[in-house]
Image (cartoon, rainbow, N blue to C red):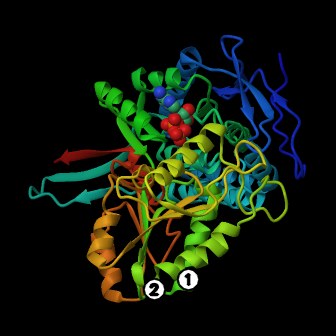
Amino acid sequence: MDPQPELELEPARGSRARELRFQQALFINGEWRSAATAATFTVEDPSTGETIATLPRAGAEETIAAIDAAHAIFADWKRVPVLQRADLLLKVAQLIHQYREPLAQLAVLEQGQPLEASRLGIDYAASFFRWFGEETRRIYGRTIPHPDPRRRVSVEYTPRGVAGLITPWNAPLASPAKKVAAALAAGCPVVLKPAELTPLSALALAWLIQQAGFPPGVFNVIFGDAPAIGTQFVEHPAVRTISFTGSLAVGRKIYSAAAEQMKHVALELGGNAPFIIFADADLEQATSDLLSLKAANSGQICVTANRLLVHHSIAGDVERRLVETYGALRVGDGFSANVEQGPLISRQAVDRVEGLVRGSQQAGSRVLCGGRRLELGPNFYPPTIVSEIPAHARLLREEIFGPVLPIQSFSEPEEALALANETRHRLSAFAYTQSLELATRCARELDFGVVGVNDPRPISCETPFGGVAESGIGREGGSEGLLDFMEARLVAFRS
Ligand code: ADP
């Protein structure tokens, strides 16, 4: 028997970890387990390309074991007294804060973003355990006055059952935290499948949940063969709700397959966010907010500005400011001091982004800065600004998920709003103006799940987050974040 995995969760190592080799890194029914076969997969440091971990590769068998364990504890977990459930969740928040530094370092190692940003990501993850720890006490339901006085009719929110959660690599702790905290608060046991590119933060979360004292089986983590695991989430009848964040292609597959058993599905599938700067905007504020939004995680966040729409009268000024600021971000290894932008997650990610920029150049657009791979390593791509882009270019139509900012100009507000809404990937939109009338119009007419007027970061644990149209279904965070994990049941008594 291997010893329980050590996740180096001691305070500050200050540098890269040695390679972590786990045979038993699947967390099932409160135990660290190996996979049924000897198959493994490796995790790479995106800054250096070095292997940082070798992990067991789970498939259908381990997934079934995890789902069965979760299902077996469901009846008990939903009856755990609410204060006890709240305390367990709050304990996880506290442990995440306690291990902030090693968790942030782990995130830099497997995901690449600069250390300071990773620390904020850890705080963000903790905020969801705190929020849902508090929120679990406020699952109120309601009583409905019925026309027949003999009837007492109420709505009760009850947990759906086992939750299968699938998360992406761009926020290795916060992305699982949002879903896990909500599901557990609602009373659903969890099987989490984090992205194979960044499974270590999820393993750390399992370790923390174990330390917090959750009953075995309430929380399980598996990874390896993503399609095989996803298939079990869809086919195993005990899984009643699936929450997925990732690509539209995989989201669609899960949604349609889950229809067979009428499972509840929540999907967060990315966006194509417009960032509009109207002629009367506070330019200093608008450009610095845009910079902070776009610089975050090398542009690899789903709410980031994907297209800048700027009034033609100020376009030159805005372009100059952005080339001077965004174009000058310090790019490098996330552990180096003063680095403002890390690598992209993989070589394929760089190839994709490079292809989008090249394609738009070939179609006649102009690259104002960046646009060429950096010699720092295969995964580094510089902040890039592109203008004069033909309307049909893929650069304007796809989610870039990288450090590239396409700029379009407009003359009238109608034109800006029409361009902004010209996408089916409607997760977030941003608009900068000092006119109350325009601000109100943007709030009304921008058809996106999140609209920030003069606000680049309206999202927090307290707010419902999710998209409309092809950006997905369901909401994370806020009190709405519990709804994907609960059924509204009608209970009636007649005297
Ligand atoms: P991204 O482009 O963000 O990597 P993916 O949709 O490929 O988006 O990945 C998001 C998550 O979905 C990851 O955890 C990944 O392992 C998982 N995934 C990929 N393919 C499947 C699948 N067929 N079934 C279930 N999960 C999958």
- Find disc 2 in the rendering and name its residue: 281
Task: From the viewer's side, name the closer residue of 203 and 273.
Answer: 273
Residues at discs 1 and 2 in contact (Cβ within 8 Å): yes
13 vs 270, left or right, is right
Tell me which amino acid carries mark 1.
Gln
- Name the spot of residue 244 as percent of width and height, x first: 46, 40
- Name the spot of residue 397 as percent of width and height, x first: 39, 52
Task: From the viewer's side, name the closer residue of 440 and 229.
Answer: 440
The residue depicted at 74 percent of the width and 52 percent of the height is 95
Quarter of the image holding residue 338? bottom right
Is disc 2 surrounded by few (<14), some (14 to 19) or many (20+) residues within 10 Å?
Answer: some
Secondary structure under tag 1 reads helix
- Name the spot of residue 8 as percent of width and height, x first: 85, 41
- Name the spot of residue 237 as percent of width and height, x first: 39, 22
Tell me which amino acid carries mark 2.
Ala
225 vs 115, left or right, is left
Q: Is residue 311 above or below residue 12?
A: below
Q: Is the residue marked 1 within 8 Å of ligand 1, measured from its CB? A: no
189 vs 382, left or right, is left
Q: Is the residue marked 2 within 8 Å of ligand 1, measured from its CB? A: no
Which numbered disc covers residue 12? none
Is disc 1 surrounded by few (<14), some (14 to 19) or many (20+) residues within 10 Å?
Answer: few
Task: From the viewer's side, name the closer residue of 300 and 125.
Answer: 300
Count of all numbered marks drawn on residues in the image: 2
The residue depicted at 78 percent of the width and 55 percent of the height is 332
Task: From the viewer's side, name the closer residue of 476 and 295.
Answer: 295
Which numbered disc covers residue 285? 1
User: Which part of the image, by quadrant, shows the N terminus?
Assistant: top right
Say if residue 288 shows up in the picture.
Answer: no
Q: Is residue 277 above or below residue 459?
A: below
